[in-house]
Image: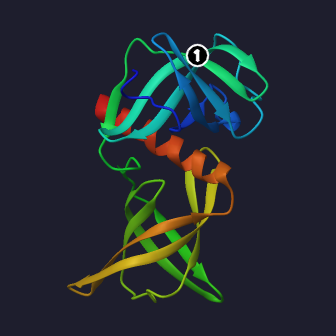
């Protein structure tokens, strides 16, 4: 793990109750563990209870399960995991996502059909062209009655046979929203691979 987790690296930690998802920076690494300084209080993260960890490395998106050996305020001592895996080379995990949603901008609403999604953005089709210079509000259903509310900024629009295919990026109103969508995409990716 020493070559995969390095000082200064940002890591997302998701305990069993994902509402307490958090992120932090690695401050030291040893052969048996590493120290993680959290951005928020360590609420919901318990000593010796397994959590999911996600981080970006030069080799791709790294995923592993581990636990806090010690908790001192916002500083956690994390045991090096026995196993890890790379989910993909993209910064954010992209998964197939078929939904009918609405994009809203001022008083205008567009019906769209999504193709795929990641915590970084969305790809969808529409029979109407949208303004590439505008930003749009969108509510993404993730599970049960939970939604991620974010701003969608189009980056690329292609037209083929009267259908527009639009790709763009998300901007979030809170880091919690981003962590929620990141976790959703990671879990969907694992579910799809295990089918």
Q: Which residue is pictured at 37% across the width and 51% down the height?
A: 94
Who is closer to the viewer here, 7 or 173?
Answer: 7
Image position of 80 (left or right of 167): right
- Give the vertical position of 105 relative to 116 (above or below): below
User: Residue 79 location, x and y as percent?
Assistant: 54, 13
Its colouring scheme is: rainbow
- Give the vertical position of 153 relative to 144 (above or below): below
Image position of 145 (left or right of 158): right
User: Residue 59 location, x and y as percent?
Assistant: 29, 38
Q: Quadrant of the N terminus?
A: top left
User: Residue 9 location, x and y as percent?
Assistant: 50, 38
Q: Is residue 195 visible?
A: no
Q: Which residue is pictured at 68% across the width and 35% down the height?
A: 38
Q: Quadrant of the C terminus?
A: top left
Q: Which residue is pictured at 38% across the width and 29% down the height?
A: 4
User: Residue 170 location, x and y as percent?
Assistant: 52, 65
Who is closer to the viewer here, 1 or 121?
Answer: 1
- Which quadrant would residue 75 be assigned to in this image? top right
According to the picture, the residue beneath numbered tag 1 turns out to be 67
Q: Is residue 66 visible?
A: yes
- Which quadrant would residue 36 be assigned to in this image? top right
- Give the vertical position of 64 relative to 80 (above or below): below
- Give the vertical position of 175 relative to 144 (above or below): below
Number of marks in picture: 1
Q: Which residue is pictured at 46% across the width and 37% down the height?
A: 55
Give the class, few, some or many, for how many residues have Cα within 10 Å of label 1's Cα (few <14, many ≥20): many
Image position of 155 (left or right of 152): left
Who is closer to the viewer here, 167 or 56?
Answer: 56
Say what secondary structure mark 1 lies in: strand
């Amino acid at each position: 793990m020493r070559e995969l987790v390095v000082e200064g690296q940002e890591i997302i930690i998701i305990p069993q109750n994902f509402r307490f998802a958090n992120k932090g920076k690695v401050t030291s690494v040893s052969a048996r563990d590493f120290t993680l300084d959290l951005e928020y209080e360590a609420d919901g993260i318990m000593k010796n209870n397994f959590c999911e960890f996600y981080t970006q490395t030069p080799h791709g998106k790294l995923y592993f399960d581990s636990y806090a050996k010690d908790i001192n305020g916002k500083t956690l001592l994390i045991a090096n995991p026995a196993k890890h895996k790379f989910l993909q080379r993209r910064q954010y995990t992209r998964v197939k996502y078929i939904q009918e949603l609405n994009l809203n901008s001022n008083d205008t609403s567009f019906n769209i059909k999504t193709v795929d999604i990641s915590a970084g953005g969305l790809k969808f089709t529409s029979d109407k062209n949208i303004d590439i210079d505008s930003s749009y509000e969108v509510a993404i259903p993730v599970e049960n009655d939970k939604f991620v509310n974010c701003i969608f900024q189009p980056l690329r629009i292609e037209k083929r046979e009267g259908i527009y295919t639009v790709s763009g990026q998300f901007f979030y109103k809170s880091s919690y929203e981003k962590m929620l969508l990141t976790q959703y995409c990671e879990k969907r990716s694992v579910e799809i691979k295990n089918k």
